[in-house]
Amino acid sequence: MGWVKPLKKFLYALPAPAFWLGVWQVCAFLVDRRLEGRGNELLLPYPATVWNALASLIGTGEFWGTVLASLGRIALGLAWGVLLGAALAVLTCASQWADRLLSPAVRVVRAAPVASFILLVLLWAGRERTPAIIAALMVLPVVWDSLSHGIRAMDPKLLELARCYRFSRWKTATLIYLPALWPYILTALTTATGLAWKSGVAAEVLCLPEPSLGQRIYYTKYYLDIPELFAWTAVTVALSMALEQLLRACLAKWGRGWGT
């Protein structure tokens, strides 16, 4: 009877997507009626049409190569953004001068339009590196802000206890800092994953590295292949949601040792 629980979860989650698919079908039908069957696929294709386009894409090796290439670029940018954001959080919390010097720059990165950064980085780094750099730049302020709040909210009594027992830096980090910061790390990483994915694909649309999801989305728009545009967009959204869920599951399993 191990299948009962997954079946209940599936049935519980089914109504929402079924409702929105129904809305999509009705809207496509109304557009079709309005245009009297002329050019409906250029405005709002039927779900079945998009599904057929998606099925034809999934069956090709080019599709999987495109997905893996985009995943690799954005994952690299995410990793660099997390590492740099964590390092900056430690540095700005440890040094008042570093905080005065670096915090304004990080806030500027957070506030600046993504499109501006994409165009600037494209000039400096080339189209192949731009999506990873943009993903890292968008992730860095999120990680920095979350971990900075966590470090400043640390209980000083725990740090005093570590000094009394003469903990090494490594022991203090793993036994004191990491458990206390774990909720902030979870929040930062789950938020950063979605942000890195969206900004990375947006950079691919403008930079057109080959192969990439952004390039395929751009070309479908250019050739007015709207069902395929919907299909690639659905792939992008599904991958973003799947990556976020996978990350949550991995972090939850990894964090059990710290009581999360």
Image (cartoon, rainbow, N blue to C red):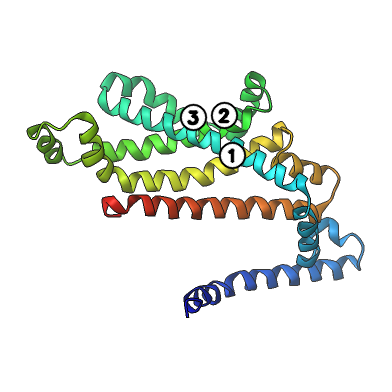
**Crowd band around label 1 with a 10 angstrom C-alpha radius: few (<14), some (14–19), many (20+):** many
Instruction: Determine which quarter of the picture holds residue 113.
Output: top right
Label 3, label 2: how far apart the Cα atoms are: 12 Å
Instruction: Determine which quarter of the picture holds residue 127.
Output: top right
| Label 2 element class | helix
Q: Nearer the viewer, mark 3 or mark 2?
A: 2
Instruction: Establish if 84 lies above or below 231.
Output: above
Q: Residue at x 77, y 61 (%)?
A: 50
| Label 1 element class | helix
Q: Which residue is mark 2?
A: 133
Q: Label 3 is placed on what type of residue? A: Val
Who is closer to the viewer here, 44 or 192? 192
Q: Which residue is mark 1?
A: 199
Label 1, label 3: how far apart the Cα atoms are: 13 Å
Q: Which residue is mark 3?
A: 109
- Total number of numbered discs in the rendering: 3
Residue 110 seen in the figure:
no
